[in-house]
Amino acid sequence: MKVISLILKLAAVGALAAAVFFIRPAAISGDRASSHEPPLSLTKIAFNFLADTEAPLKGQERDRINVLVLGMTGVPHPAPFLTDTIIIASIKPSPVRSSIASNGASTSKLALLSIPRDLLVKIPGSGARTKINALFAMNGKDPALLAQTIETITGQPIDYYLVLDVSGTQQIVDSLGGLNVLVPDDVNDLAFPTDTGGTETFAIEKGWRYFDGATVQKYLRTRHSKGGDFARMRQQQAVIEALRKKVFGLNMLYDFPTVLSLYRTLTAHIQTDIGEKEVKRFYDIAQNISYDNVIHTVVDGDPKDASALLKSKTIELGGMPAFVLVPKTGDFDYYSITETATNIFNKP
């Protein structure tokens, strides 16, 4: 039973922060970013769980663990290595050993902060300007440069990373038998990009919808409807939460084939520096995060929203005009984003 539960733990780590954006190591030359370590070993994870072995997580001493979650479309989609999804998943594990309060309520929290792909940044070390979603590919598909930039923008140290590609979404959702997602507004994207370079119409009516993997993948990529890219970021966060619920709702015995399928898919599509001993601790925290303790925040640039932190402008990048987002207070003045990230757990 414990081994089955352990497999669920690995699935939960992916579901907790990743859910929507999955990487296939083979599509990036077979190398893992930064660490170049082998994929997580189920045997090692199972041994650590059965031996009740877990490693303290980086960030626990400050009562905040920050995981940088990067999502890209992957091969065969156009521009496969641009990280069009950038989320800082912050976990507040307090108290360290027990996350259940005396009244039975969970005290652990999860905050998801989405950073828009078009945010204008300076490349560390050179000072040249680029969109933030280009840094991963620019650095040889290594997340270190992007993590450094995120730390500058948010004022938050990045403790771990997860890199994923969208092509794994379909397999994960289909393994789970589909996903129940609340669609807040009608989606009517008349120019959804196809893999052949053309476009098609993608339409979904608002309300609760049960999506298969292919539909979830499209729902997470569409951005030509109401709310544009900012709506897409909120859709990504909603799917993360739906997937987290579905994973933790699995029965460790009766759903074993599903659990095993999830493990195989996740190891094929996730690139991370989370170690085998750390997986157990992540799961112990994640399983005790209630829906009420999940905070969703988007760094917004919607011109119709007076409280938005960003504004849009057109500049020249690589000799071509480019749409970018910059802070309202100045192109590289990230104080408002830093303040949002710092105080995210105090959000009303």
Image (cartoon, rainbow, N blue to C red):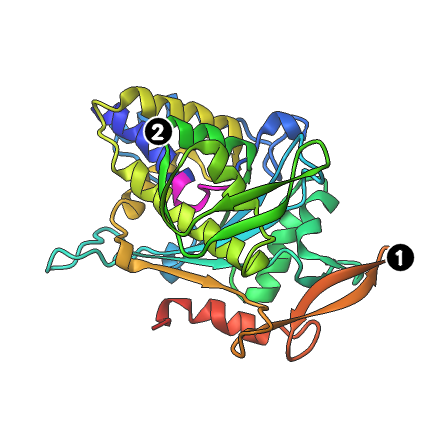
Q: Which residues are magenta?
A: 15-21
Q: Relative to the observer, which residue lies in front, 207 or 8? A: 207
Label 1 sits on what residue type?
Answer: Gly
Q: Most extreme residue toward the right, as rendered?
A: 319
Considering only vertical position in the picture, is 158 above or below 72?
A: below
Q: Residue at x 59, y 29 (%)?
A: 25
- Pointer 1 with pointer 2, Cβ within 8 A: no
Is residue 134 on the magenta stretch?
no
Considering only vertical position in the picture, is 28 above or below 139?
A: above
Residue 250 in picture, x, y percent from top left = 26, 32
Q: CA distance from mark 1 to mark 2?
A: 47 Å
Q: Residue at x 41, y 46 (%)?
A: 240
Is residue 18 on the magenta stretch?
yes
- Label 1 neighbourhood size at 10 Å, few (<14), some (14-19), many (20+)? few
Which mark sits nearer the N-terminus, 1 or 2? 2
Quarter of the image with the N terminus is top left
Q: Which mark is residue 177?
A: 2
Q: Relative to the observer, which residue lies in front, 180 or 39? A: 180
- Label 2 neighbourhood size at 10 Å, few (<14), some (14-19), many (20+)? some
Residue 108 in picture, x, y percent from top left = 28, 56
Residue 41 in picture, x, y percent from top left = 43, 24
Label 2 sits on what residue type?
Answer: Gly
Residue under label 1: 319
Label 2: which secondary element: loop
Quarter of the image with the C terminus is bottom left
